[in-house]
Amino acid sequence: MTLLEVENLHTEFPMDGYTIPALDDVSLSVSSGEIVGVVGESGSGKTVLAESVMGIVEEPGRVTDGEIRFKGESLLSKTESELQSVRGSDISLVFQDPMNSLNPTITVGEQVAETIRLHQDVGESVSLGAEVKRKLLGATKHSESWKRSIEMLETVGIPEPASRASSYPHEFSGGMRQRALIAIALSCEPDLLIADEPTTALDVTTQAKLLDELEALAEAFDTAVMVITHDLAVVAELCEFVYVMYAGEVVERARTERLFRQPQHPYTVGLLDSIPHLDGSTELGAIPGDVPERTGQMEGCLFAPRCPEATQECHENRPSDRSVGDGEHSAACLKRGESQSVDLVNKHD
Ligand SMILES: Nc1ncnc2c1ncn2[C@@H]1O[C@H](COP(=O)(O)OP(=O)(O)OP(=O)(O)O)[C@@H](O)[C@H]1O
Ligand code: NI
């Protein structure tokens, strides 16, 4: 079943005298239980995408066109209080920086317990599975939500959860804080978890461990995950399907295995070349240059200035999605595939 559908989404930041098109015609979909990756360099629009879905785009930014549907219902036409209930129980967001997302003055256990109690209030009014309801109703009292909080901390791999629950966020290591955030996010029993750079701040070993655990948790909780990352290694580890973003656009989409085997867009090829080798070295400068700051209309392919294959037409014409191989794989590159307009949203369920 398709859980999240983003269709031709435009999110803009009106600035002094110009507009930044942070998301320019972005389409993607996530099915229930699926782990989908959104990958791209800094400034490509990944976080704005997450914020657009959650309805928390920073002022003065706003969604100007397109549609976001969750379980078939338009999120864009929901009121703020309706959206709050979606955020409390259907979609959870885990941010990159756990220190800013946790309350420094409340114990970690209490923060998890709070979410459990809060969710239980809305839980009455939404349709939930019997198992979930039983768990939630079991947490009626304070002491019970505390008990359940300790269970959650244990589930996400926090050692000695009964005593660690009484610790404050600053007493936790980076990895433990990130785990606590995941515990909070999962306490809502969401259908969709959006994880924005969930492991960037962590060392490589902790990262790998946490990614494994995230995968297991997603399966155990039957939660779909949208993983936002600049790191294709994270995508390889976790995701079934991947969207590659560049300067506010999706430039390639494919099943992960296929993307790694047969990358089509020169940007994706560059990203793959810059994955660190096992010995820790990286091919530095695999893609020279940076993602352009978009300050209004720009002509041609946005990647052309950095592209080794760009020709005159690339600087003049903006490529749209082209089918490259199978129905699920597309790339927005004039040098690839058939010139035809394809509607690929939802083609991968
Ligand atoms: N609050 C804001 N005000 C103005 N422009 C913004 C704002 N937030 C984002 N943008 C614009 O949107 C672009 C995309 O930002 P976004 O944070 O989504 O990138 P990202 O892919 O998440 O990058 P990173 O990997 O660094 O987190 C930015 O380059 C900037 O031009
Ligand atoms: Ni970001």
Image (cartoon, grey):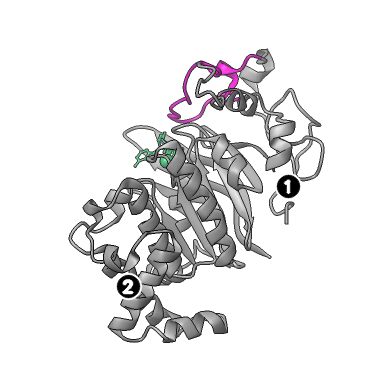
Circle 2: element type: helix
Principal secondary structure, stretch drawn in magenta: loop
Position of 38 compared to 89: left or right? right
Q: Quadrant of ligand 2?
A: top left
Q: Which residue is mark 1?
A: 343
Any magenta on residue 290?
yes
Some atom of ligand 1 lies within 8 Å of the CB belonging to the residue at label 1:
no
Under mark 1, the amino acid is Asp
Which stretch is magenta?
285-308
Q: Position of residue 18 (x, y in %)?
A: 39, 32
Q: Is residue 118 above or below residue 2?
A: below
At a point 47% along the width and 51% down the height, the residue shown is 195
Under mark 2, the amino acid is Ala
**Number of marks:** 2
At a point 39% along the width and 55% down the height, the residue shown is 179
Position of 308 compared to 13: left or right? right
Dividing the picture into quadrants, the one containing residue 113 is bottom left
At a point 50% along the width and 24% down the height, the residue shown is 280
Dividing the picture into quadrants, the one containing residue 31 is bottom right
Most foreground residue, 276 or 292: 276
On the rendered image, what quadrant is the N terminus found in?
Answer: bottom right
Can residue 321 be seen at all in this image of the molecule? no
How far apart, in angstroms, are the residues tagged by discs 2 and 1?
Answer: 44 Å
Which of the two discs, 2 and 1, sits closer to the camera?
2
Q: Is residue 138 above or below residue 276?
A: below
Dividing the picture into quadrants, the one containing residue 30 is bottom right
Can residue 152 be seen at all in this image of the molecule? yes
Q: Position of residue 65 (x, y in %)?
A: 53, 50
Q: Is residue 196 above or below residue 302?
A: below
Q: Position of residue 29 (x, y in %)?
A: 63, 54
Q: Which disc number belongs to residue 113? A: 2
Circle 1: element type: loop
